[in-house]
Amino acid sequence: MKEMTTIRKVLGAPSETHELGRVIGASCHGGERIRLEGELGAGKTAFTRGLADGLGLSPASVSSPTFTILHEHADGREGIRLVHADLYRVSDRDELEALGWDELEADPTTVLAVEWPDRVDGILEEPHLVVRLSHGLDEDSRELELSIAAGSEYLQPQDQRSCPACGTSVASGDQHHPFCSGRCRMADLGNWFSGRYAISRDIEEDDLVDPDVQ
């Protein structure tokens, strides 16, 4: 796996898990590969609903894959498609390839969010993002471990030409674009974790449909 930078945070309610997914989804441009890790009921589906929200898709259309290996959600903003996969019951890669996995993995317009990736050898070994969720100290809280691949471009507004953290001019082809450095990238994400960035809208009831179904 690529070198990863990891941030840890306690999420106090399902709405916070949803909002994390929405913030990340709003920053995706297609082609992102996301590993979702955590036990049953840890919040993976709540995160994916938020991811769909940020991609311009209906959060209410996202449910736990469970008995369907691949759930496709098409027609997001800019033509982005979300594929939510659950590999818990998959026995080998051949089974996935029969469902068109190779095409999905190569598609630059598809955001792949994969639960239980470790069940199949060689799947998503080089993700852009790893989201690990576990149960917190009370019924609603979750412990989050968010790992971001070094040099990942998944959190970038494409038209940005100056570092949003410090204002330094940044070339579009720079390794850390739109940030001038990995340090500024993590400082910007840290602002969200610390609450310095406001949620752009209120969480609606439809965003939290069956929040305990993971």
Image (tube, rainbow, N blue to C red):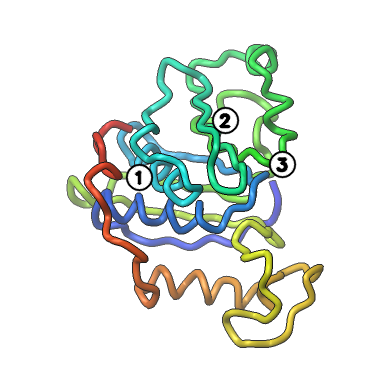
Q: Is residue 143 above or below residue 43?
A: below
Spatial CA span between label 2 and label 1: 17 Å
Residue 151, above or below 103: below
The three-letter code of the residue at mark 1 reads Ser
Which residue is more in the foreground, 59 or 134? 59
Q: Position of residue 178 (x, y in %)?
A: 67, 72
Mark 2, other Cα within 10 Å: few <14 / some 14–19 / many ≥20: some
The first of marks 2 and 1 along the sequence is 2
Q: Nearer the viewer, residue 119 or 63?
A: 63
Q: Is residue 203 above or below residue 88?
A: below
Name the residue: 39% across, 33% down. 62
| Left or right relative to 177: residue 68 | left
CA gap between label 2 and label 3 equals: 23 Å
Name the residue located 24 percent from the left edge and 34 percent from the top edge. Answer: 210
What amino acid is labelled 2 in the image? Asp
Please name whichever residue, 85 or 146, is drawn nearer the observer in this view of the structure: 85
**Is residue 134 found left or right of 153 in the rendered image?**
left
Three-letter amino acid code of the residue under disc 3: Pro
Q: Is residue 53 left or right of residue 3?
A: left
Tag nearer the camera, 2 or 3 = 3
Q: Where 154 sits versus 103, above or below?
A: below
Name the quadrant containing residue 157. bottom right
Q: Quadrant of the C terminus?
A: top left
Which residue carries the number 2 mark?
118
Helix, strand or loop at label 3? It is: loop
Residue identified by numbered label 3: 108
The residue identified by callout 1 is 134
Horizontal and vertical percent position of residue 209:
25, 37
